[in-house]
Amino acid sequence: MQLSRPIVQSQTLPEPFKQRCIDQNRSIITDDGVMRIDAQVHRTQDANKELIQKKLANIIRNAFKEPKVRKKTEPPKHVIDARIAEKKRRSKIRQNRTVLKFYD
């Protein structure tokens, strides 16, 4: 069973939600802007139709959810200090490996 809906030309969805729906579901939208939802899980056509309707409802419901905005954070001071201390320690180890050449 397959459902095809032209999502790009849809006038029922507001533009920001339509764009979010397209961005979230690129794998099921063709180049023409048609959304194709497949369901072949159940043995009966009615059960597959019901499953497709649930999938479509979930897609639209997710489009109406506001995306979470990630807050930029900085690493704690002790983490930065530990990283710098480790770099200095490794630097000293590498410096000790060099052979000093004395010229006459």
Image (cartoon, grey):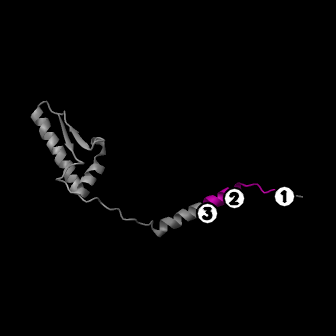
x and y, in percent, of residue 33 in the image: 27, 44
* Residue 63 versus residue 51 in the image, above or below: below
Give how far apart the Cα atoms at labels 1 and 3 are.
26 Å
Dot 1 or dot 2, earlier in sequence: 2
Q: Quadrant of residue 30?
A: top left
* Mark 1 element type: loop
The residue carrying pointer 1 sits among few (fewer than 14), some (14 to 19) or many (20 or more) residues within 10 Å by Cα, namely few
x and y, in percent, of residue 62 in the image: 22, 53
Say which residue appears at 52% left-offset and 67% top-offset: 81
Q: Are marks 1 and 3 in contact (CB under 8 Å)?
A: no
Near-viewer residue (51 or 75): 51
Query: Of the residues shown, which amino acid type is indicated by label 2?
Result: Gln
Give how far apart the Cα atoms at labels 3 and 2 are.
10 Å
Say which residue appears at 78% left-offset and 57% top-offset: 100
Q: Which residues are magenta?
A: 88-102
Q: Are marks 3 and 2 in contact (CB under 8 Å)?
A: no
x and y, in percent, of residue 11 in the image: 18, 52
* Mark 3 element type: helix
Dot 3 or dot 2, earlier in sequence: 3
The N terminus sits in image quarter: top left
Looking at this rendering, what residue extends furthest in the right direction?
104
Give residue 95's mark. 2
